[in-house]
Image (cartoon, rainbow, N blue to C red):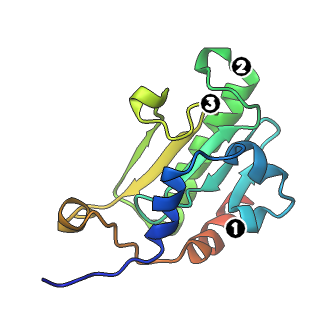
């Protein structure tokens, strides 16, 4: 049997076992360093950031700044900022990475698969034909061809236009 090493996954495995302290969607925007936080864009009421544990290269998330897990509690202005960032995210990914499709959506509540159920966030996952293979099924491992820092450097300028 061959072994494929993905040592960076241990951080994710450990984090999944530990109850997270704080909220990444509240803490990272206040870090003061958007590149370190991998925040790609800000609007007055929402922001876009790369997912630290991406399903595919370019997987990002859009969230309101306000800490809430209730979709129906968002204001019209918050929804507009989120929608504009979702649109800008698809555009930036399409221009820079050329995906053939996208998964865009959210998991609302822990029972629906939300890893952070108390802060709404939408996932934008670029997709390519054949981007799934035996690795996630058999090896329980995703193979990503690009480091997060490289993806950030490619995408961030697309949001500043």
Q: Residue at x 40, y 58 (%)?
A: 55
Of pointers 3 and 2, the one earlier in the residue sequence = 2
Dot label at residue 76: 2
Query: Horizontally, is 15 left or right of 57 in the view?
Result: right
Q: Residue at x 63, y 69 (%)?
A: 152
Query: Horizontally, is 40 left or right of 94 in the view?
Result: right
Q: Quadrant of residue 60?
A: bottom right
Q: Which residue is mark 3?
A: 118
Q: Which SS class for mark 1?
A: helix
Alpha carbon distance from label 3 to label 1: 30 Å
User: Closer to the camera: disc 3 or disc 2?
Assistant: 3
Taking depth in this image into account, of 60 and 11 the one nearest to the observer is: 11
Q: Which residue is mark 1?
A: 157
Of pointers 3 and 1, the one earlier in the residue sequence = 3
User: Closer to the camera: disc 3 or disc 1?
Assistant: 3
Alpha carbon distance from label 2 to label 1: 28 Å
Mark 3: few/some/many CA within 10 Å (<14, 14-19, 20+): some
Residue 128 against residue 45 in the figure, above or below: below
Residue 65 against residue 5 in the figure, above or below: above
Task: Say whether marks 3 and 1 touch (CB < 8 Å).
Answer: no
Taking depth in this image into account, of 122 and 116 the one nearest to the observer is: 116
Alpha carbon distance from label 3 to label 2: 19 Å
Report x, y in % for residue 21: 69, 46
Q: Residue furthest top?
A: 72
Mark 2: few/some/many CA within 10 Å (<14, 14-19, 20+): few
Q: Is residue 161 visible?
A: no
Query: Horizontally, is 147 left or right of 29 in the view?
Result: left
Report x, y in % for residue 97: 47, 67
**Quarter of the image where the N terminus is located:** bottom left
Q: Which SS class for mark 2?
A: helix
């Amino acid at each position: 049997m061959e072994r494929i090493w993905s040592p960076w996954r241990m951080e994710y495995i450990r984090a999944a076992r530990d109850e997270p302290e704080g909220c990444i969607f509240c803490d990272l925007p206040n870090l003061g360093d958007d590149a370190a936080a991998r925040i790609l864009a800000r609007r007055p009421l929402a922001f876009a950031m790369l997912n630290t544990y991406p399903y595919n290269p370019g997987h990002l998330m859009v969230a309101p700044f306000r800490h809430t897990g209730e979709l129906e509690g968002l204001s019209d202005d918050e929804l507009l900022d989120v929608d504009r960032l979702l649109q800008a995210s698809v555009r930036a990914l399409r221009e820079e990475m050329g995906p053939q499709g996208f998964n865009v959506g959210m998991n609302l509540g822990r029972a629906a698969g939300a890893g952070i159920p108390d802060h709404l966030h939408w996932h934008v996952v670029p997709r390519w034909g054949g981007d799934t293979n035996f690795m996630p099924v058999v090896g329980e491992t995703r193979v990503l061809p690009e480091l997060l820092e490289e993806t950030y450097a490619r995408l961030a300028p697309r949001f500043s236009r």
